[in-house]
Image (tube, rainbow, N blue to C red):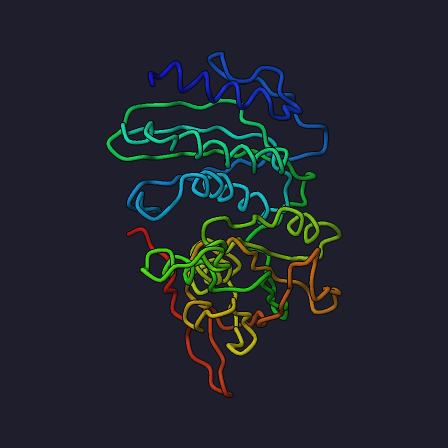
Amino acid sequence: MVENEVIESIRKRASHARQEGVRLGIGDDAAVVKPLPSGCDSLLTTDQIIENTHFLQSSHPPDALGWKCLARGLSDIAAMGGKPLHFLLSLGLPEWVFANGWLRQFLSEMFRLAGSTGTALVGGDVARAERFTAHVTVTGSVPAGTVLRRDKARLGNVVYVSGDLGGSVLGLERLQSLTKTQDDPAIERHLRPRPRLDLGRYLRKAGRATAAIDLSDGLSTDARRVAEASRIGIEIDESAVPRFAGAAVEQALHGGEEYELLFTARPSTPMPSSWRGVRLTPIGTVVARQGVFLTSSGNSRPLKPQGFRHF
């Protein structure tokens, strides 16, 4: 398959999807999209997946990888309380992706997620590469001045997480083991994370959340990012951290690729125990001493960031 055939295949798939707000899509030197309505801010985020860094060809099926590739960027939009609009896709393609329909399966699941979230592919690039790489840039919108940020947590705020933690790293371990089974919920959690777009918008509206971040690198690492950005401390109750069925405490504290939301809210803000089937759990408090601390059996100790690290 040559470059033009790859591009044409992607263009056809994109043309069948909803193209709301797109004046000119794939096929020209640049896409043309309609300007945002007055009173909206633009959101831009980018992410990438690299063979042997983020996935192994031997264990990660292509359809799930295509889903996750877009889900990662959508999760960033969710953490800001935004609505996704468009995305750009750039691919580095080794020869093996053309065998057995691998690339077709990768794109199929990516477009399925794009369609269900109203995110239109408007352009990108393809190139030959020694290892498979996929770079995704996602755009979104949010009412002006209302975006959720990491630096707005305040003393006395309650700290919450959505969903259950530790499932993705547990799923990765099972995926790479010899004992993996069909329809394992932990493996499904790792392969097809669900970006919390509806929840992010719910938390943004009426100022329900003061700060937010998506849990891409692990609770211990991402909580520290909020603490450092807001110049405060976070105290987490170990017994309150919701764990995915079968996950150990350490997996819930440090496991990455959860794509749940960690957020803070004023104590006076009513917060439901769940939102559209997603559990919302208070796990701690914003405190004056800077850093992240874990309390257990009446004792408190610093919680070191031991989530995913690239370097």
Nearest the camera: 149 or 278? 278
Nearest the camera: 145 or 66? 66
Nearest the camera: 229 or 182? 182
Residue at x 46% of width, y 74% of height: 293
Residue 185 screen position, x and y as percent: 51, 59
Nearest the camera: 169 or 254? 169
Image height of 53 relative to 97, above or below: below
Residue 202 screen position, x and y as percent: 70, 51
Number of residue marks: 0
Would you identify the image quadrant in which residue 84 lies? top right
Horizontal side, residue 300 vs residue 140: left or right: left
Image height of 175 relative to 64, above or below: below
Residue 212 screen position, x and y as percent: 58, 55
Residue at x 53% of width, y 45% of height: 76
Quadrant occupied by the N terminus: top left
- Outermost residue on the left side: it is 130
Residue at x 58% of width, y 63% of height: 161
